[in-house]
Image (cartoon, rainbow, N blue to C red):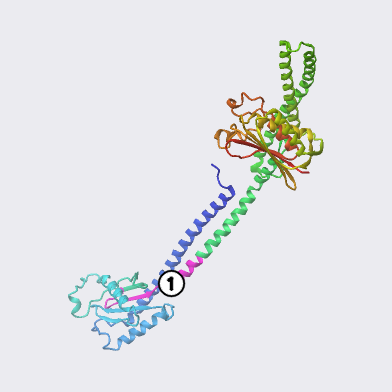
Amino acid sequence: MKLPSFRLRIALLSTALAGTTLVGFGAVSWFQIYNAKISRLDAELLNHLMRATPNLPPRGEPPKIQGKESRPSRWQFYKDSLSDGFGTNTKTPIALLVLDANGNILYQSNSLPADVEVNRLLLKRLQLIPLPPPPQGEPAPSNRNLSVGPPPFLRPRPPQFLTENTAKAAWRIGATKFPNAQVAIAVNLEAIDREMAIIRNIFLVSIPGSLLLVAVGAWLVSGGALRPVHQLTGAIQQVTVKGLDQRIPIGTTDVEFVELIQVFNLMLERLERSFTQASRFSGDAAHELKTPLTILQGELERTLQQVDPGSEVQQRLSNLLDEVRRLSGIMRKLLLLSLADAGKMSLYLVEVDMSELLMEMLEDVEMLAPQLNVQTDFSDGLRLQGDRDLLIQVLQNLFSNAIKYNLANGWIKIRAHQTQTTLHVTITNASKDIPVSDAYSARDRDRIFERFYRGDPARTRKIEGIGLGLSLAREIARAHHGDLTLDSTAFGQTAFTLTLPMK
């Protein structure tokens, strides 16, 4: 399975790690800031609860009911001062509830639309707070004694703070019980919520922006880290059959890639040595066999003229002469391939009329395979610069294959056209030997130009050839700076396209 880009994976992984870190840091920071604000609010609540002591009725004084004495004005003044004490503006709702030791209401806020629900929360909270503990050696008071006479001296309970929610808002409530009264203050958390919303929005904007910067930075850094790999790839791409003597320099390479380059240079050295030996062997063998084969062919031809026509000796000599000629053709192909491997295939460039060559090939097809239906689609005047003899050899090979691998009553189509810079010659024939839809032949498509490769032996053992023709034809096309390719066609046909530059 092919993995995605390594550089992309580095950038995405860096972004994911940075994103996780930033989101975690943002969440922790948000909660820490929120808790700090709540803690500061609790400290202010505690301070204001302690400030309520001077406004409480003296110990032993009978409780007064709100609205029947002047003390509520003092509580109203105390409540009005809470906004300044908390450092808030007048828009921040604050609720106050004061009860005496017996639970009678001394003061409660009535100016807010939600005061009824908030006062209910304050009253509920005061009811949940236990009475202050009695002094040492004095029994705890009972509820029955609270309605008769003043309460005994009790130490105040430590204030308790918690957050309660109404239908529309959240409130921070602080409540405590004094020996002679109960006080509860609720502060609307809307201001803190607005501040935390601003901080949250800052995080929501800054974190994606930071992640974008991290992704771009990781992409650039990974690109810089992988630059030696790209340089190594470019150097390797320059190494071809004609450039096996090249070596990749190590001096300007990072330390991490030195060993890789050394191994690659050693591999190139082994490949160069092996290829040189193989190329030299095939070239030398072809060259050394060329002379004795020529002599043998001449002797057979002369001897064949001296024997009686129609005799058994003449038949045997004819068979031997055919094999010698076939062997000579193989030697010529091997010699040309060895020259192509060494980059020494010389071209005698002249102006070649490709239309004329195709017409000559058509005459040969009509003589060798008159049963085939030949269709043509090319015009006159298709000219280019090339080696005429070598191009004839390419066309002969393509037409020979089109005849050998055709069906009994098949067809051959020849199409040639040119663009401003390129000439295309496509030869298509009916065939069942290289069908595109066949899985086995699809694998053979990449190997059909290999030397001595002939596909499935069951299909080719009755057909003459050793598998050098297509390989040599492609080498000749590439020597002309063109190419020879096997086209993708429908089932039941095979097509080869020869591409040659016009100049």
Residue 194 lies in the magenta stretch: yes
**In the picture shown, does residue 157 fall above or below 305?**
below
Residue stretch rendered in magenta on the structure: 176-203
Q: In the image, is 8 to the left or to the right of 162? A: right
Instruction: Name the spot of residue 471 as percent of width and height, x first.
Output: 69, 32
Q: Nearer the viewer, residue 466 or 287?
A: 466
The quarter holding residue 243 reads top right
Quarter containing the C terminus? top right
The quarter holding residue 354 reads top right
User: Mark 1 sits on what residue?
Assistant: 192
Q: Nearer the viewer, residue 369 or 159?
A: 369
Asked which secondary structure carries label 1, the reply is: helix
Q: Which residue is drawn at 64% across and 43% down?
A: 256
Instruction: Name the spot of residue 212 as percent of width and height, x first.
Output: 56, 59
**In the picture shown, does residue 489 fall above or below 66?**
above
Residue 485 lies in the magenta stretch: no
Q: Residues within 10 Å of mark 1 (few under 14, many from 20)?
A: some
Any part of residue 222 in sight: yes
Q: How many labels does the image show?
A: 1
